[in-house]
Image (cartoon, coloured by chain):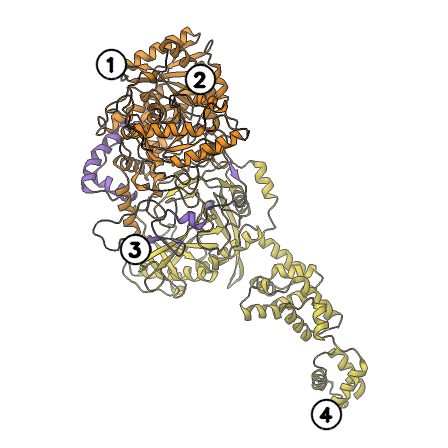
Amino acid sequence: MSDGISRADVAHLANLARIDLSDAELDRLTPELTVILESVAQVAAIASADVPPTSHAVPLSNVFREDVVTPGLTPEQALAGAPAVEQQRFAVPRILGEDA
Amino acid sequence: MTATRTELVPFDAALETYDPAMGLEVHVELNTASKMFCGCSTVFGAEPNTQVCPTCLGLPGALPVVNGKAVESAIRIGLALNCSIAPWSRFARKNYFYPDMPKNFQTSQYDEPIAYDGWTEVTVETDEGPRVFRIDIERAHMEEDTGKSLHVGGSTGRIHGADHSLVDYNRAGIPLIEVVTKPILGAGKYAPLVARAYVASLRELVKALDVSDARMEQGSMRCDVNLSLAPSGSDVLGTRSETKNVNSLRSVERAVRYEVERHAGILDAGQKVVQETRHWHEDTGVTTSGREKSDAEDYRYFPEPDLVPVAPSDAWVEELRATLPEPPAERRARLQAEWGYSDLEMRDVVGAGAIDLIEATISAGATPTAARKWWLGDLARRANDTATPIDELGVTPTQVAEVQALVDAKRINDKLARQVFDGLVAGEGTPEEIVAARGLEVVSDDGALAAAVDRAIEANPDVADKIRDGKVAAAGALIGAVMKDMRGQADAGRVRELIIEKLS
Amino acid sequence: MSTIRLSAAEIAEKLAAGEVSSAEVTQDHLDRIAAVDGDVNAFLALDGEGALETARDVDARRAAGETLHPLAGVPIAVKDVVATEGIVTTAGSRILEGWVPPYDAFLTRRLRAAGLPILGKTNMDEFAMGSSTEHSAYGPTHNPWDLDRIPGGSGGGSAAAVGAYEAPLAIGTDTGGSIRQPAAVTGTVGVKPTYGGVSRYGLIALASSLDQAGPVTRSVLDAALLHELIGGHDPLDSTSIDAPVPPVVEAARRADVSGLRIGIVRELGGEGYQAGVRARFDEAVTLLTKAGAEIVEVSCPSFEYALSTYYLILPAEASSNLAKFDAMRYGLRVGPHGVADPSAEQVMAATREAGFGDEVKRRIIIGTYALSSGYYDAYYGSAQKVRTLIAQDFARAFEQVDVLISPTSPTTAFRLGSKLDDPMSMYLQDVATIPANLAGIPGLSLPVGVAEEDGLPVGLQVLAPAMADDRLYNVGAALERLLLEQWGAPLLSKAPELATKEATK
Ligand SMILES: [Mg+2]
Ligand SMILES: [Zn+2]
């Protein structure tokens, strides 16, 4: 399964993960990631179809909250850490439109 | 970025060559008091960022807890759509970056939705009369809404060309139910109507369940339309387009129609339809290309580790099933039969959104005919003239029944009743009080009426002669004169009797 | 006389008896921090004023005769991954530099309600990714036993603070060993409770299905006292267990292993474990046998895959948990170089490039890969299955024995910088601690001596079934007492004295 990971793969993943990796980082990360992936790939070999997956160590279900309004943050608290604020809103750079 | 521009093919012509297949995805905002995963209020229209907390702002460390009422609503919607309810389902994270999404993943459901495999039916008027179409439901799942962005700068207020954006997270985390149909085939030229009827029936359904306000104009119900064309008779589906945010019933119909025409144009030109997201423009009635679906859209779904499975017991599901209201279509049929309305009359009632009002008016004592007369006549006109929802006019069903009772008792007539409604809308009190305060009661004193009749005969000798000659139909002119003299406050039937008595 | 070398239980007793005030104890620790932390770098942020204010308040309430929590007035250090309202919280990352949370984590609320003065926030590997605290964006923490060595990680700051007598108590978090391995290499005690035993609300998430907060202390009893305080159900954490905290304090006081069946996991030991680590472990086993425990060897064959499983699940969950750091709502915002009027997308990517360190980027990329379409089943899906196998191994083992033991870490503290270029060898540090996180069971590490070859502390790990955390404390306290009888003084008293600077008040 692990046929290595190419520099282009790493660049694609970095783009998916929104990290602007430099060329030097791509060069360094690609072989490091290859080693890590090769060593972790063995899990596929022993995970046979009849083994159920475990997502939580302690099996719980149906944990619900009552539909009751509880106090949250004031707008001042909510916006206190924001890099930029305008009109009591979080100011963000222009968003690349989906409708170009 | 998409295929070369091609001509649209007129709808009827397109349908001669192609069969449309539709898929509808409707997002319904639930009317819970608090959000899907936190205790923040969901009230619409609050000041920006006043209904937020660490969880719905995606602050580091905050965690979600599922709103039990939202699960209940999801199950009830599923049951009302004849779905199976999953005995075990999970939330999943849908990972993608967008500034209005605080965690940069949407907590949604993926391969384990709470409700699946259902169906519903809609009735559409065809050339051959009303026809029932069955819509198969793929799934109904729970998820959360995003925040809202205001785009600043640029000329249009739209995202494109904006200088920067301002985000309000009040809406972030409001519970949504997404209802997805299976491909709807075989609707042919009725596809636009079927799509519209389906969305309308879904809206009616969630309102009857009292799980959503379903106000399309406020965005609490939003529709995505998937459409593809295949050559007539072919059993393979064509490439589909996905038109986002079609947010009125009329637009649903128009968007389907437009996409049929556009796809046919592309296919007729020998080109390939591009699988892409498109945007609906309400103002111009066209769709434009958004982004192409590509591998950039890899949502990396995985089970949400901060939440535990939802595993409704059979007992709970049955308890919820027992709370389901009568299905809207069945209820309409039952009421139509009870009230004796024609198909046309019933359709008008439904179209005016007056079915609940009429039902309440009848149970307050009015006859079905009287109730329909007022709600679809004078009151519908007022709603229309003032652009007010008919149930927000300020006139209650009980009041309408009271007004009709006054008419039946001959204390007022229909014309005076309209003045009573004026008083009700103006908040002048009960119908009885308004009649008294405005002095609207018809004059039943024969002495006063007789005097008015005498004056009318005197003023219109030629008309009086005609009546004496047996032309009773001419009495109308005299009745009009008397009513005018009495400022409308007379019982026209009694006036007529007096005129005939005097002239025979 | 300074109170810094007292245990938390001893301080609590003296506070209750009126022999010292919380203000004095708190000031002693602040002085100690001022004297040694320049070298140790255990703290990222201090809140001396806030701590003293809490201390004075507790003193006043005690004077007024109010009934207080047993630990009221005992100062504590909190790992920087825990949200503390009003105190900067960075998780050791540049991307959160200067971020002041507007809310408290569940356990912070518990600490405040019980009246524990919070001295400050402790250093850690960025977002808890690491086993050496070298991946902190704010410089490494140094091991008080040897300032050239690592204090373990990711919670090296909490372990070093406690080991250097800068705090009697600290909070850690453990996703794959981040409480236990630092405890082992600094000669302190650390406990990872059962998953769901301590609320995760307000812990900056690394891997949601593995993260667990717990105590870092210098004695088993102290750990139990702190565990009891921060444990228990929290309706704001859906994975929190709705059951009473196991009787951990009672167990720590009982400290009796006679008749207990103790299992040694064949797969956690032997090759790859430093000679001095094995020697101290074997001696501890002998002590336990003498004290009446029955030693049984058990096999957990799937543990061989635990590390691989962990390095798929953790990065996958982390890649999603860390997506929220995007420069839009809080934290760092930088634009890309040489781009006029950048888009939000470009600002996100540039900020994450500048704000995340190498290890964080490595794991985000691995996690993104493990979740991407076409690879999910082979990677994340398979890892979830192996998790089941590991849990089944534990279940079988616990049918035969009451607790399991192993060395906590295969080596003693290594030299700063020696493994930075070799992620895989760094990952091996947690080979013995990771299985517990994958299965959600509790684990404790306590010091069992120093390795002959380097004179550095060695830790022994005790593991118990889920919700049987009390067994850890019973066995840990029993072994601690036996060792103390041998040594005559706590192991930490053998650590070299740190150079102190005169406190500038
Ligand atoms: Mg959706
Ligand atoms: Zn909220």
Per the image, the residue denoted by label 3 is B272
Per the image, the residue denoted by label 2 is C398
Dot 1: chain letter: C
Where is residue C143 drawn, in percent x and y? Answer: 29, 24
Viewer-nearest of discs 1 and 2: 1
Q: CA distance from mark 3 to mark 1?
A: 73 Å
Relative to C344, B339 lies left or right: right
Dot 2: chain letter: C
Per the image, the residue denoted by label 1 is C453
Q: Quadrant of the C terminus of chain B?
A: bottom right
**Amino acid type at image mark 2:** Phe
Q: Is residue C503 above or below residue C262?
A: below
Where is residue C244 drawn, in percent x and y? Answer: 52, 26
**Amino acid type at image mark 4:** Ala
Q: CA distance from mark 1 to mark 2?
A: 34 Å
What residue lies at 61% left-to-right and 45% top-to-bottom? B323
What shade has chain B been given? yellow
Neighbor class of circle 3 (other Cα within 10 Å; few <14, some 14-19, many 20+) is: some
Circle 1 — which element?
Answer: loop
Res B444 seen here: yes
Per the image, the residue denoted by label 4 is B459
Q: Nearer the viewer, residue C242 or B407?
A: C242
What residue lies at 58% left-to-right and 53% top-to-bottom? B208
Contact, mark 2 vs mark 3 (Cβ under 8 Å) = no
What shade has chain A been given? purple
Q: CA distance from mark 4 to mark 1?
A: 132 Å
